[in-house]
Amino acid sequence: MQADSPPPSSRGTPSRRGRSARMAMLAASHSTDALPSEFSNKQLNSFTSCLSIPVEGALPIKPQDDAPSSPQSRMSQQATPGSSKRAPRKSKTNALAALQSHASQLSNDEGNSQDVTDDFFNGHSPIPVSPCLDLSSVKTSGPRYPPDHTSSRPFGLPDCPAFYPTSDEFKDPMTYIRSISEKAASFGICKIVPPVGWRMPFVTNTETFRFKTRLQRLNSIEATSRAKVNFLEQLYRFHKQQGNPRVSVPTINHKPLDLWLLRKEVQNLGGYEAVTKNKKWGDLGAILGYRGIPGLSTQIKNSYTRIILPYEHFCERVRKSPALSSSPTIKTDPHLKTHTNIQSSNSRQSSLRYPSSPPSSPLTSSSSSLSEPDDGDSKERIRTRSETNSVKRSMRTATQGQFASTVMSRNGFGRMPSAAGTTQPDEVQKLTQEQSCEICQKKNYEDQMLLCDGCDCGFHMFCLDPPLTSIPRGEWFCDACLFVTGGDFGFDEGEEHSLTSFQARDLEFRRRWWATHPPTHKSPPDLNDPTVTCVGNTVVTEHDIEREFWRLVQSPNETVEIEYGADVHSTTHGSAMPTLETHPLEPASRDPWNLNNMPILSESLLRYIKSDISGMTVPWTYVGMIFSTFCWHNEDHYTYSINFQHWGETKTWYGIPGADADKFEAAIKSEAPDLFEAQPDLLFQLVTLMNPKRLSEAGVRVYACNQRAGEFVITFPKAYHAGFNHGLNFNEAVNFALPDWLPYGRDCVQRYREHRKLPVFSHDELLVTITQQSQSIKTAQWLEASLQEMTERELGSRRAARAMGITERIEDEDRPEDQYQCSYCKVFCYLSQVICHCKSEVVCVEHAKHLCNHPINQHVLRLRFSDVDLQENLAKVSERAAIPAAWKAKFQRVLSDSSVPQLRSLRALLAEGERINYPLPELASLRKCVNRASEWLDASNTFIIRKQSRKRSRRSRGRPSANESTPLSFDDRDPGDRPDRTLDDLYALLREVETLGFDTHEIGALRTLAEQAEVIKSKASALLKDDRAATDRDAFFNECERLLMEASSVNVNLEEIHEVEKIVTRESLVKELEEKVDDTTATLEDIRNLLSRARACNLPEDNTYMKMLLARQHAGDDWEERARHILDQPFKTIEELDELSSTDSNVPVDVSIYDRLMSARTRAKEFEKQAKIWLLPDNQGSKPKVAEVMRFVARAEKDFSIPAVKDLRQTAEFALDLESRCEAILRNRYQHRDEVDIFEMMTKWRSYAREHLSVFSLPTFEKLDTQLTLHQKWLEDLPWYCQQHGAKHGQDILNDVVDSTRPEDDLPPNDEYFTCICNAPVRPPPPGTQSDAVQCDHCFARFHGECAANGGSCPFCDHRHWNGAINKGRNWHFCFLPQILLSAPEVTKNYCEAWKQLEIIVHRVDRLSSVIGHFLTFASQPGNQRAEYIPQVRHYMRKLYKIQFAVSPSREVSFGLDLAGLHRILAGQPAPVRVRKRRRAKFVFGQDIDKDWLDGTRCICRGRTPFLLNFPTVECEMCNRRYHTGCVFYPIEGPMGQQLHRFLCPLCCIRKNRPYEYSEVRVKHFDNSDEDTYVNTTLMLETSSKDIIYKTLPRPYTQTLIVELIRYTSYSSGSSEVVNCPPPPHSVLTPPLARPPESGPSTSHRLSHTPLPLPTPPTPVYELARQPSTNGHHVPPPPPWSTQWHNITSNPTPTRRSEVPEYSLPPPPPLSLSPHSGKKRKFADESPPPEARGSRSPKQTRRLPQTPILPPASVPARAMQQTLSPSLAMIVSPVDTEPSPRPASSVPYSGPTSSSQRPSNTPPVKPIKLVMPKNK
């Protein structure tokens, strides 16, 4: 996995190692104390930083304020709470290492810099960026097959292999990687290109994703460059500290001598003494590049002796000094490996540093020039340092070997303690007293105590070697700090970026860099090459970038600083691949190549780690820019890694196979030995590169590859790898482990232990977990060796512990990792730990002595498992792993015991091998062998095992069969039962088994069988050649039979036996034919069998028996053909079945067909019998139901055609249709459309059913029959029923009742001429004519002469008209009618017109009776008997007189007599004073001033709508004006289709103060423009107002007419006032036009009572005529409804009685308010109240001004709608008032009596002139 450079310190400052790349180089370039020019090249140094490019969104990283924690505390943060000190990832490891050293600081020293900074910024404003990354601006895919280049890769490196798996291979990552690892592991790395179509979505939120970067200086990363700088600085410091700061670098032939290279070559040749002894100084000159220079060897030797040799002596002395050798930073072990324990060494270094002040670094301001004189400004430098570092404090613990810095104050010329400075004198004195000398460990001679500027430790000047006599000027370093100079290299922190800001910086840096450093090409690159990129105007190839990168890495003078976003934690920033937690519906979240799933796949060993490890089992992401690099390293625990590039520019990888890891370490160590001597853990820091070419020259195999978008790169165990980026890219990486990694993992743990490096997880715990969770053989195979090594190692450690006397304790539960990590070597000792009661730390057995000071026998060895458990666990795994080997051994033993092993042994081995869940190579061949042997065995069993005979005994069925005798010699087996394998087949099997190589007892059985077959074959051949067949036939026949019996035991097909069998069969057949040829019981199957046997025996066709058999077979075939034809017919007749069943007995028949034939005949006879029983009943049994008969008919007609059944079906259909019609009648769903009365029709039904359908049970018809009987009885109970004619004369009574009971006619007419008993006024005759009117002497009422002639007396005054003295035609009482109404049966209520008439009469007369009763109750009071009520009394008496029959709640009461008595009382009172009639106000509307329109109308529309020109019109009976029916909402026809005869126009209704019947009418005054303000004409007429009164009304919600008021004239107190309202032009309000209304008084009434359309009658069920039956039984004629009544059908939808067509009486005029009319309509024939029509202030039409409002009239309208009136309720039920048996809406509308039905003496009412337009 790509692991990059270490992160910065957690303190937010440069690493505490003391020097980062950026800080070191800046300090070196800007300090006057930097390396002298003699120690460097003469060229100018250039510095280019990407940080100089300002970008929006890039933020500096804020330092953390908290104090740095110890390495152990930070390491513990990597694990879960309470877990172990798990080692962090490499970047964190490096951060911990860097934390131990001081960060370098820039000096404020004055001086001139020799560096040239390449500033990309130049004052430009920051580059703006968008918040989200546009993925179209980056490369999201690369070329699948990159083009081949003629030029080789730089340094001539070979490419690692690239693999292109197919879709099937790509399904399982671990299987595929394991398949390629054998080839790819030898390269260290490989590339995998996914198949076409595979895609991994990028799910990172580019708007919120932010990351931190690290700064990398390319020329500080290379090992040789950094080693050279460190050496020169150490050399300079040494000479300066020795008092010789002006030592100059010699020049030879005007070329500076490379001191570092000189020293390196001298060491390579064996050192100074060896070179001098061997006289190699001259050879060194040639190596250093000097040729032909006199005295070259002397110059080189002198230079080495003067400058380098003293420093080498110093280094040797320091190495041998006790103080430095005890320091853990310097390893004295000559076999020390390069993987050093960073934590332990850095802990030491951390204790040597003061936390708040960075140390001096070789390239910081503390460095001074070697060649320049030390002038006086050194005082200034010392003073400045004294000011900034005035106080230093540290503690030193002798037992731990840690140093502490003491607060020291420095004066200008020395480093002795002083009271000057910023620290208070008392504190300085106290801290100085605590300082001790690091050599003599004494605190005396404080004035001689010298502090080191590197470690802040104290030294007596006289204790130093050599001792110092005076305080040195400038900085002073102790020997240890001087020796380790330069071992504190690290990376600085960069800035915090978003993806867009990082992209902008990368693009701008690339553009400017390539613009100033364009590459050179021999030939122009192909722009279509996907590896070629255009950066600005520069064309750059991948090889150009690679060459430029290594040039910058090796350049000593050109410094480039870039940023790298490495090791971005996916746990905090989120993985760029979808996961099941973030994207559960994304299929890619379950993809095995998803890096979130890769570590936990079934074959990855990391899935057994119990906790997540960030960067190892949880992916990390990497954001790179151009030239950003990751240095040489291998993975934690030597695991595999996989890296996927989501998008971006190319990433170049370099890989070294794991086998060459030691060569690589040796090569890089030899390249820069000083670096590894000062910093043995250098490779762990990920800060060092080495040129691949130099590695190749050292014999290290180095391979390279270019990774592009959408490609994977895999690194193999222990393989070192490095690389760099070609531009902005986004990668993601994670670790995994396959079983072959286990040995590498164990080696890595041991290496960590040697260097005291923190491991990431416990290797032993991983092995134990695998054994617990995986029990497969496959796991045991690769786990056994590692588990055995672990067990032996652990048992050895325990034996050592027991030898030391340590006691033991076993624990059954796991502990947190920090509780079983050795505090000394940092290894995870999971299986056993040494503990002590004095501390919580643990150690391994090897370091038990380092735990504490207690005796070792007081320590405890804490064991996780006992020795027995470990050994048993190993034994189980070993046993499981040995299963395949044991099986193989058994397999080899079976093969070696015999050349032809037993088949049962091979089968047992195969079964055992298939139970082993492990691939066995030998199992496939064994399975093939056993399968082939099983096939041979099956073939041999066909000879050895005889098949069971399938022959069935044949017995004739249907007809009795004769005794059959079959000769014993006859083999009647089926052909399938005879042997089908020949003797040749048997010999072939025997030959085949010899080549198969196994043994079984079936082989011997086959050989025996072959011998028997040969014997029988020879006997049969002898018989066939024997001549006794003609001479001694019986003996020959018997011998043949014996041979056949013997051959039947041999299951081999022999042709000779077949011939013998034919002889025996033919002889037996002839004998059998002699017996059976004339047998009449033989079936057709028997005949056919005999023929088949005869032909098989070659019996000639002219044989007598053959002819007889053929004849009988022909007759049987003919019968079978006819029988099959009849049985296959859909409808079979009894005659045909009878014909076939009486066939001649000599004809053989098929028994099965014969049985079917007879069964069908029997069923047909049964059907016929049952049909005749039902058609001709004996009236003794129960009658069948129609449904039962129809099911019987359906079953019979399914297969047969029987006349009796057809007649039964026709009769049953008549009955079924009658039942359905009767049910429709009873359910009130029958639609009657014929002119014939429905009850007359039902009477015909009844007669037909009783005559023709009495054979069936008709329950529905019986119910209807009962209803019809009750109906006839009910009709006879009607008072007006005529027994003589059988007719119901109720229409005249209904007309009179309707005409006399209109609710709107409850008030008397407002006309003084209405005095007669009829309803016509008695007006004076025209001039010149004589009137026939007569006048009553008592009441002065005038009567028509014709009316007065009836009775000869005044009907108002004479009681005889009301008490029955004068005979009337209707002499019954009303109180009996409600009882008759309720006693009617349901069929009467649903279909009888007489009942509907009676219902209307009862309800209307009941209402009138209630009104008269209320009036009589009111007028019976003495105070209410006034003469002005005489018109009202007469009005009621006229109604009763016209009705004729007595009307009252009971028989004891007669309203006629009561009214007559009241009339006499009122008429006897003096005449009232007549009040002068007041003149009404006069309204003039717009229609009054209009002229007649083209069609003669003065309509509401006022002629402004042209399409109404030919519309139907209606004429007002008062003003004789004509209106369009649509404009006034007048219905053309009434509710029952009859013509309406009254119409009062809206204008006349306004003038008469009446409500308009058909809509609401509003009056609009043109002078008022308010939409909701109208004229209140009602109030103006009632109050005789002089002014116009307005009212506010809501918007119209129903049919509304609006008329315009033009002029108003009021009459008050005999004078008139005119209010003129001249209409302005075009101000007429036109009412909304509606389509012509349908018949009925209102829209709502019409909608609820519109008749439903009748359905089209279906085709009649039965035919009109049918031929008479010829069976002799009765067939009924067609029913009466099948011909003349075919148009009457039943409607399945229930119909209410109100929806059946009834009387079409005209609707009554609108109801006016009266003392008795305050209630709403109770029945459908009553007009709705004015409120229901929308009139807002209706008034009564006829009104007596003196008539008060009667109290009884205030009965609630709702109660009167829902219940009967009190009088009707009293009549029906004196105790309980029952509700009306029918809803009020079910009563049809009825209008007044037409003029033709009026009495002759009543003048006719003027009819309405309904004018229809003519058709044009």
Image (cartoon, rainbow, N blue to C red):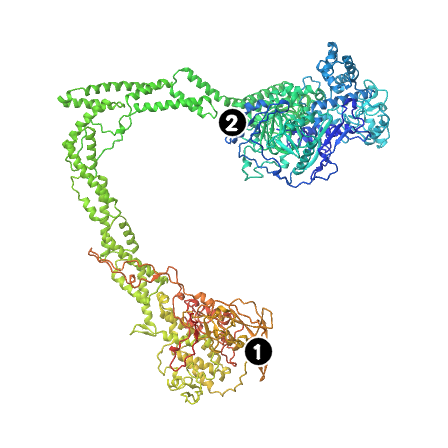
Which of disc 2 and disc 1 is earlier in sequence? 2
Quadrant of the rendering where the N terminus is positioned? top right
Instruction: Specify whether 457 is left or right of 1518.
Output: right
**In the rendered image, is residue 1366 in sight?**
yes
Front one among 99 and 1571:
1571
Please tell me how crowded label 2 is: few (under 14), some (14-19), or many (20+) other residues with Cα within 10 Å.
Answer: few
**In the rendered image, is residue 829 in sight?**
no
Q: Which mark is residue 1335?
A: none
Front one among 1291 and 1284:
1291
Which residue lies under the disc numbered 2? 775
User: Residue 431 location in percent, x, y?
Assistant: 82, 28
User: Residue 569 location in percent, x, y?
Assistant: 64, 34
Please tell me how crowded label 1 is: few (under 14), some (14-19), or many (20+) other residues with Cα within 10 Å.
Answer: some
Q: For the point 30% across and 72% down, which residue is it?
A: 1286
Q: Outermost residue toward the front?
A: 523
Which residue lies under the disc numbered 1? 1608
Distance from label 1 to label 2 (Cα)? 114 Å
The amino acid type of the residue labelled 1 equals: Tyr
